[in-house]
Image (tube, grey):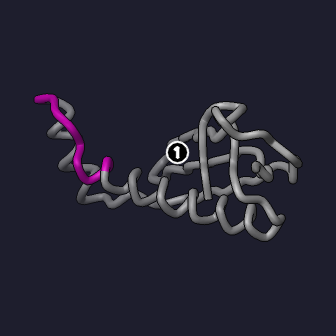
Amino acid sequence: MLIVTTDAIVGKNIQEVKGLVTGSIVQSRNIGKDILSGFKSVIGGELKSYTGMLEDSKKMVKERLIEQAEAAGANAIVGLRFELSAGQGTSELIGYGTAVIVD
């Protein structure tokens, strides 16, 4: 499955638009990680545990997008976007794009 953030794919023609595909995941954060991250935020630096959680979330959301696109008969997704929101003790990652058939 070809996935791009652009609305077109260079060298390919969109033959048919199959429609919107979406995927999301809500994860709870670990209180122990939150405490350690609080210390890290004081001194600065990457919060590696949250980076890892975000990478895992992106992988799962992309898998869900691909499943929907394949079910619609598409072979590509254009216009991919991610949005992240964090609440008290949780984070939600939403991905969406347009499933298409390209030649």
- The residue under label 1 is 87
Horizontally, is 26 left or right of 72 in the view? left
Q: 1 or 35, which is in the foreground?
A: 1
Residue depicted at 69% across the width and 49% down the height: 77
Residue depicted at 55% across the width and 40% down the height: 85
Residue stretch rendered in magenta on the structure: 43-51
Q: Amino acid at mark 1?
A: Gly
Horizontally, is 39 left or right of 95 in the view? left
Residue depicted at 74% across the width and 67% down the height: 70
Q: 90 or 97, which is in the foreground?
A: 97
Could you tell me residue 29's position as x and y percent? 39, 57
Residue at far left of view:
43
Q: Is residue 44 magenta?
A: yes
Could you tell me residue 94's position as x and y percent? 62, 48
Give the number of marks.
1
Q: 33 or 12, which is in the foreground?
A: 12
Horizontally, is 31 left or right of 19 in the view? left
Element on which disc 1 rests:
strand
Q: Quadrant of the N terminus?
A: bottom right
Using the image, determine if residue 85 lies above or below residue 50: above
Could you tell me residue 34's position as x and y percent? 28, 50
Using the image, determine if residue 19 lies above or below residue 42: below
Could you tell me residue 92's position as x and y percent? 55, 50
Residue depicted at 60% across the width and 48% down the height: 3
Question: Alpha-carbon neighbours of circle 1 within 10 Å: few (<14), some, or many (≥20)?
Answer: few
Using the image, determine if residue 73 lies above or below residue 8: below
